[in-house]
Amino acid sequence: MKTMISMIFMSVLAVVAGCKYERRGESAAVMVVEKPAPAIMPRVAAPANAELLDETGALALFAGETSEDSAFNKKDQDEPSYSRNSLYLRRRMADGTYEWRLVMTSDGSWKDADGMDGWCKDRADDARKIFRVLRARLSTDRRAIWLVCDPHTFTYSIVCRFDIGENTLRVLGDGDTADEQPDGTILIKGRKTYLQDEKGEPLGAAWYDVWITPDGKVVRKTKPVQL
């Protein structure tokens, strides 16, 4: 069943030319495979307040607002930091029209990925309750979406991986980016830590960059720097 879902999603997301994908930013003519998406990515109208997050060939990811998002944000004007949005996929069809799919929204139907520790599970709960995506990019193989979300903790953002075929969200830690690198690692900038001196006295917060594998294993990192 999981394999079938993955295959359906791949056909929805596929932008193919002899089994090759376009590189990001190219605008050459492409063939779009037109097969129905599963119910977990429903077809919807174009969202309100749409903001382009990523575009590659015929596919684009947007942050936007559902009617529920808009109502929540209007009611929450005194606390704008708690505003929410949703993640959308826009696909350019063969006839030049656009199809919109709702990928993720507050109280969404996605599952938590297996193997997350307590901190990551708590942040996944935060993301589900008031979903707000800050950045998003399709993975190179189109099987996942790399996300930076606002957990509304006021001190950091969280880096997540949404597995399309599995319909699961995995929180991988805090950070400001989730950029796939040529060697397959993911570059996360702005991960936060707290430094101490030789006597164990606190020196305050510092930030560093880290490269991880897609499942979250740290490969290398920079030295923390205080700003």
Image: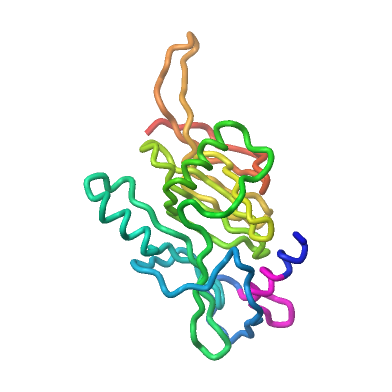
**Residue 97 x %, y %:** 49, 86
Q: Quadrant of residue 117?
A: top right
Q: Residue at x 53, y 62 (%)?
A: 103
Check if residue 130 falls in the magenta segment: no
Residue 28: where, in percent of width, then height? 57, 84
On screen, 136 above or below 118? below
Q: Position of residue 209 (x, y in %)?
A: 52, 40
- Residue lying at 58% horizontally and 88% vertically, measured from the top left: 94
Q: Nearer the viewer, residue 25 or 107?
A: 107
Q: Residue furthest top?
A: 199
On whether residue 20 falls in the magenta region, the answer is: yes
| On screen, residue 140 above or below 113 | below
The magenta segment is: 8-22
Give the left or right position of residue 78, taking residue 205 as reference.
Answer: left
Q: Above or below — where is 139 with respect to 169?
A: below
In the picture as drawn, the residue positioned furthest to the bottom comes out as 95
- Picture colour scheme: rainbow
Q: Position of residue 128 (x, y in %)?
A: 49, 47
- Judging depth in this view, the residue of 96 and 54 nearest the camera is 96
The C terminus lies in quadrant = top left
